[in-house]
Image (cartoon, rainbow, N blue to C red):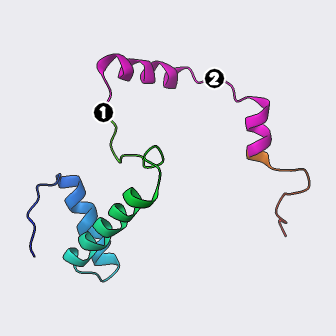
Amino acid sequence: MQISAHISEETREQLETYASAHGMKKGALVEQALLHHLQALRELPADIVIPPRLELSPDSFAEVVRLLARPRKPAKAMKALMTGPPGDEPDRA
């Protein structure tokens, strides 16, 4: 079966780049991606699947811009999580 779909230029470029780099036919890559996505939709809770694009209202976008312009300092718990347990540093020989 053949399916026709409109995709963005950016998506087309990514598709062609990946298929070329991995020696795949574009049709095989699209089918593999669709199967993977449909399996995820069947097996994962709906709130786990994050859409690849998010649409924001103008107000929400303004809030994101505001938060990015003045990021908060990380909490102690976040610092501890990111640094890992003491003595867990990799050897640098």
In the depicted structure, whether residue 79 falls above or below residue 43: above
In this image, 76 relative to 16: left or right?
Answer: right
Q: Which residue is mark 2?
A: 72
Q: Secondary structure at mark 1?
A: loop
Which part of the image, by quadrant, shows the C terminus? bottom right
The amino acid sitting under disc 1 is: Glu
**Displayed quadrant of residue 59:** top left
Q: Decide whether residue 73 is among the magenta residues.
A: yes
Residue at point 10%, 67% (across, down) = 3
In the depicted structure, whether residue 53 falls above or below residue 70: below
Percent of width and height locating residue 55: 30, 33
Query: Which of the pair 8/34 is nearer the observer?
Result: 34
In this image, 31 relative to 92: left or right?
Answer: left
**Displayed quadrant of residue 36:** bottom left
Q: Nearer the viewer, mark 2 or mark 1?
A: 1
**Displayed quadrant of residue 19:** bottom left
The amino acid sitting under disc 2 is: Arg
Q: Residue furthest bottom?
A: 23
Do the residues under discs 2 and 1 have CB atoms within 8 angstroms?
no
Q: Decide whether residue 51 is among the magenta residues.
A: no
Q: CA distance from mark 2 to mark 1?
A: 24 Å
> Of marks 2 and 1, which one's residue comes earlier in the chain?
1
In the depicted structure, whether residue 21 falls above or below residue 34: below
Most prominent secondary structure in the magenta stretch? helix
Q: Which residue is mark 1?
A: 55
Query: Which of the pair 42/21 is nearer the observer?
Result: 42
Percent of width and height locating residue 23: 30, 83
Q: Which mark is residue 84?
A: none
Residue at point 47%, 50% (across, down) = 45
Residue bounds of the magenta highlight: 55-81
Q: Assess disc 2: are there few (<14), some (14-19) or many (≥20) residues with their C-alpha within 10 Å of its C-alpha.
A: few
